[in-house]
Image: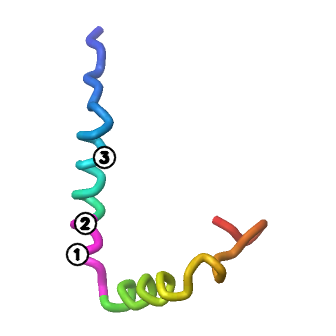
Amino acid sequence: MQKPKHEPKPMMAARFQAEARAVLANRSVKASRFLDVAMSKGRDFEPVGRLAG
């Protein structure tokens, strides 16, 4: 039985950032508008309590 290879955290973080940038670059216009509005409103409009994700 072989031990699984462990990826160092800085390399894992860089890989996740690259994946996130690729996904965001390919987002639709509707999703882009939704995210832009959410960013402009800030955290004050996020749901809390039972409504939170």
How many neighbours does mark 3 have within 10 angstroms: few (below 14), some (14-19), or many (20 or more)? few
Which residue type carries mark 2?
Arg
- The range drawn in magenta is 21-28
The disc label shown at residue 25, or none: 1
Q: Residue at x 29, y 8 (%)?
A: 1
Residue 52 position within the rendered picture, expressed as x and y whole percent measured from the top left? 68, 68
Q: Of all residues shown, which one is farthest toward the right?
A: 49
Between 25 and 43, which is closer to the camera in this rendering?
A: 43
Residue that badge 3 annotates? 13
Which residue type carries mark 3?
Ala
Q: Secondary structure at mark 1?
A: helix
Please tell me whether residue 39 is drawn above or below residue 19 in the rendered image: below
Give the mark nearer the N terminus: 1 vs 3.
Answer: 3
Question: Dominant secondary structure of the magenta stretch?
Answer: helix
Mark 1 in CB contact with mark 2 (< 8 angstroms): yes
Front: mark 1 or 3: 3
Count of numbered labels shown in the rendering: 3
| Label 1 to label 2: alpha-carbon separation | 6 Å
Q: Is residue 5 magenta?
A: no
Mark 2 in CB contact with mark 3 (< 8 angstroms): no
Question: Which of the 4 quarters of the picture holds residue 11?
Answer: top left
Residue 13 position within the rendered picture, expressed as x and y whole percent measured from the top left? 30, 46
| Label 1 to label 3: alpha-carbon separation | 18 Å
| Label 2 to label 3: alpha-carbon separation | 12 Å
Residue that badge 2 annotates? 21
Which residue type carries mark 1?
Ala
